[in-house]
């Protein structure tokens, strides 16, 4: 079985069946789910994630992968930053929320979009 490169699952607009970058929610709103990892063994998702900041101020974005330790990313003003580069992740069987990649703006600019792709 060959790997297939696809847009992150959170980028799908079901109403139009198209893919587009997702505007990242600002705290205290709930984190934005950008991808659902496959929790069926032996599937492994290799994820590339980008954050784009269109504001004139830097933004702090918290990224959480599969209920792991959240990490902060500083996205400079008017820039695109690659956060993950084909990083391998397994989902957690029986734990839907433990199989998500979420992003949330916690400081600075409010116009941050997330986009990327995965191979499975």
Image (cartoon, grey):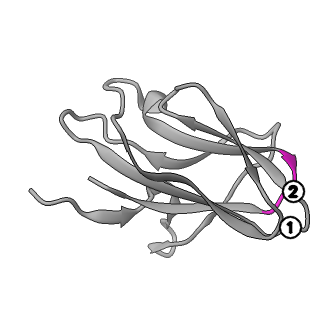
Queried whether the magenta region covers residue 108, the answer comes back as: yes
Q: Considering depth in this image, is 32 or 85 the residue closer to the camera? A: 85
Residue drawn where x is 48% and y is 38% of the image: 100
Queried whether the magenta region covers residue 8, the answer comes back as: no
Q: Considering depth in this image, is 118 or 11 the residue closer to the camera? A: 118
Q: Considering depth in this image, is 80 or 113 the residue closer to the camera? A: 80
Q: Is residue 66 above or below residue 9?
A: above
Q: Give the residue pinned by disc 1.
A: 55
Count neighbours of disc 1 (C-alpha within 10 A) and say few if under 14, some if 14 to 19, many if 20 or more: some
Seen in the image, is 56 located left or right of residue 18?
Answer: right
Q: CA distance from mark 2 to mark 1?
A: 6 Å
Q: Quadrant of residue 113?
A: bottom right
Q: Earlier in the sequence, mark 2 or mark 1?
A: 1
Q: Give the residue pinned by disc 2.
A: 109
Q: Which residues are magenta?
A: 107-111
For the N terminus, the image quarter is bottom left
Q: Position of residue 64 (x, y in %)?
A: 58, 35
Residue drawn where x is 91% and y is 68% of the image: 56
């Amino acid at each position: 079985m060959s790997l297939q490169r696809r847009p992150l699952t959170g980028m799908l607009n079901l109403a139009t069946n198209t893919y587009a970058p997702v505007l990242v929610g600002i705290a205290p709103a709930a984190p934005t789910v950008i991808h659902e990892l496959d929790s069926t063994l032996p599937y492994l998702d290799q994820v590339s994630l980008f954050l784009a900041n269109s504001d004139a101020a830097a933004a702090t974005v918290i990224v959480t992968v599969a209920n792991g330790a959240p990490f902060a990313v500083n996205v400079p003003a008017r820039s695109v930053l690659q956060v993950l580069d084909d990083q391998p992740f397994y989902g957690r069987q029986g734990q839907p929320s433990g199989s998500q990649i979420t992003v949330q703006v916690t400081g600075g600019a409010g116009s941050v979009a997330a986009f990327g792709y995965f191979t499975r």
